[in-house]
Image (cartoon, grey):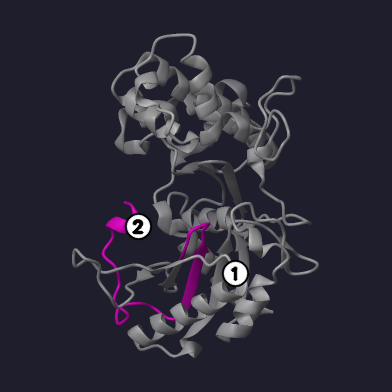
Amino acid sequence: MRQDQRALLSIEDAREPFFVGVDIGGTSMKVGLVDDFGRSVCTGEVDADGVSRRFIAIKTDMNPHNAVKLLTESINVLCNRLGLTKSQCCAIGLGVPGTLNPKTQCLRELPNLHGWNGFPIAVEVEKSAGIPVTFCNDANAAAYGEFWVGSAAGKKSVALLTLGTGIGCGIIIDGRSINGETGYGGECGHIIIDSSANAMICGCGVRGHLEAYSGSLGVARRTLELTTRRPSSIRNKITPETRMSDIARIVYVEAENGDEAAIEIVLETAKYLAIGITSILHTIDPDCILLGGAMTFGGNESEIGRRFLQKIIDEVKRQTFIAVAENLSIEFSTLGSDAGFIGAAGLARKNFLDQKTI
């Protein structure tokens, strides 16, 4: 069951200690409270339909100093609404779409937050909020959310691929997030799947990366190329005003409607993903591979989404060791857009508990 289909907890029914999860995106930030069992606590307000809200959403300020101020204010508002003192919030998990230099504690380059490069985000949030902060890459945060209370609950290890404009990846092994020596652990969207001289160019500027073929921009480029060579209803849906980032959605709709070229693009995307997944399997051998993000072609709710997933499974089985395939599950993630703030809170909880046992 998806997180947003579960009944939210009232603060009275939640189990202490509490942890704040923050999911920072390119345009908005989510701030939510999670209890000791990974359950979202209602924010104390309802939306226009009278439904209790799971998080406070605020616009991401391009000035990181202002963003820290907004985050602190939102955390204070959340605590006040729920009648909590700051001492009852043991830690903050901060999920950010980029990496932190572990030596300097400053952010590296963030593609969608240009004014944030070199900013010591975790240090500044901890100083402003007065609560210990655990930093995590947003993909690792989402992976931990699924590992803790989502599709991979009960598994020992998981790799979550987030499919969108690019391809993010979070890896959790034995409950630990894989960050790497320089903070670039788990950058599986940049696995090389085509080493030819004319391979497609990734957004990072290098040819042949998985993201170049299976990110939404790669899907768009392949779609435009294919539909110049053969008839397809897709061409009638694409206008000069259509953004490249919207073409994958058009492909999904037309595939659902039975367009053969659109179906071919979806299944070809699955084949490319399977190549990347096979490399992940032969490197870390996880229990579970999860697929999430905005470009799952409808996921389990769609016939074409289920075909997309089955094609990945079939191709992975064909390419990997028998023993690996037999013990592996490949599924869609279930927490949706909540995975980021829940997982960030979960990693903060893990760090808090680890420190208590030292």
- Tell me if residue 114 comes above or below residue 262 in the rendering: below
The residue type indicated by label 1 comes to: Asn
> Mark 1 = which residue?
63
Q: Position of residue 276 (x, y in %)?
A: 62, 32
Residue occupying the point 72% across, 36% down = 205
- Front position in the image: 255 or 228: 228
Let me know if residue 17 appears in the view.
no
- Tell me if residue 323 comes above or below residue 116 in the rendering: above
Mark 2–mark 1 distance (CA, rounded to whole Å): 31 Å
Q: Earlier in the sequence, mark 2 or mark 1?
A: 2
Residue occupying the point 31% across, 18% down = 258
Q: Which mark identifies residue 3?
A: 2
Q: Is residue 96 left or right of residue 246?
A: right
Q: Quadrant of residue 279?
A: top right
Other-residue count near label 2 (Cα within 10 Å), few / some / many at <14 / 14–19 / ≥20: some
Which quadrant does the C terminus fall into? Answer: bottom right
Range shown magenta: 1-29
Residue occupying the point 74% across, 19% down = 196
Q: Position of residue 302 (x, y in %)?
A: 31, 33
Q: Residue furthest left?
A: 50
Q: Position of residue 14 (x, y in %)?
A: 35, 77
Q: Which mark identifies residue 304?
A: none
